[in-house]
């Protein structure tokens, strides 16, 4: 028997598996007598198996107190009397957050509309024709004056001028 075959058979042999026939068991024991590396694996496997068995024994496992499950359930799930208060506070908090978000969105919309309006006014002021003198067309000369500009601008006569 080779070491790889022996190491595979060690687990079955230790657990008392019935898949190993008598011939394979004899070959394994013969291999363990002659191979120091497999003997070391066998000893480590036995120590690990004994440690696991000692942990699995029922008398070694400590018992939980009688009220353990009640206390655990209380810690995981708070009593019903405090639960509605928590849910109410959570609902109030969520409503408050929704209002803040809505107000925030409303403020952003107002600020954006003011910005667009201001940019529109600025654009109108920049690109609009700023010729401040009114245009006078002959068809609009309703008073019959020869110089229609005199209707728009007041030019005092020399006799009306006063010296200060």
Image (tube, grey):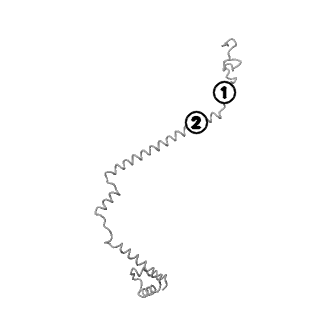
- Give percent across and percent down for residue 8: 46, 80
Front disc: 2 or 1 = 2
In the rendered image, the vertical position of residue 152 relative to residue 58, given as above or below: above
In the rendered image, the vertical position of residue 75 relative to residue 119, given as above or below: below
From this viewpoint, which residue is outermost toward the top?
A: 159
Q: Residues within 10 Å of mark 1 (few under 14, many from 20)?
A: few
Residue in the picture at 41% in, 46% down = 93
122 or 5, which lies in front? 5
In the rendered image, the vertical position of residue 52 relative to residue 142, given as above or below: below
- Give percent across and percent down for residue 91: 39, 47
Residue carrying label 1? 132
Residue in the picture at 66% in, 30% down = 130
Label 1 secondary element: loop
154 or 36, which lies in front? 36
Find residue 120 and report its image quarter. top right
In this picture, residue 8 sits left or right of residue 55: right
From this viewpoint, which residue is outermost toward the left?
A: 66
Q: Earlier in the sequence, mark 2 or mark 1?
A: 2
Distance from disc 2 to disc 1, alpha carbons, whole Å, reads: 22 Å
146 or 22, which lies in front? 22
Which disc number belongs to residue 7? Answer: none
Quadrant (top left, top right, bottom left, bottom right) of the C terminus: top right
Label 2 secondary element: helix
The number of callouts visible is 2
From this viewpoint, which residue is outermost toward the right?
A: 146
Q: Residues within 10 Å of mark 2 (few under 14, many from 20)?
A: few
- Give percent across and percent down for residue 26: 42, 87
Find residue 27 and report its image quarter. bottom left
Residue carrying label 2? 118
Residues at marks 2 and 1 touching, judged by CB atoms closer than 8 Å:
no
- Give percent across and percent down for residue 158: 70, 13
């Amino acid at each position: 028997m080779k070491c790889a075959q022996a190491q595979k058979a060690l687990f079955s042999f230790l657990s008392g598996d019935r898949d190993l026939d008598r011939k394979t068991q004899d070959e394994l024991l013969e291999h363990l007598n002659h191979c120091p590396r497999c003997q070391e694996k066998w000893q480590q496997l036995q120590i690990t198996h004994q440690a696991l068995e000692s942990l699995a024994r029922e008398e070694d496992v400590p018992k939980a107190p009688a009220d353990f499950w009640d206390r655990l359930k209380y810690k995981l799930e708070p009593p019903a009397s405090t639960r509605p208060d928590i849910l109410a506070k959570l609902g109030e908090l969520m409503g408050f957050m929704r209002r803040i978000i809505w107000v925030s969105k409303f403020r952003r919309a107002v600020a954006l509309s003011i910005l667009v309006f201001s940019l529109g006014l600025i654009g109108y002021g920049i690109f609009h024709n700023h010729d401040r003198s009114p245009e006078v067309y002959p068809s609009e000369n309703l008073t019959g004056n020869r110089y229609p500009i005199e209707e728009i601008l007041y030019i005092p006569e020399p006799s009306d001028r006063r010296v200060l």
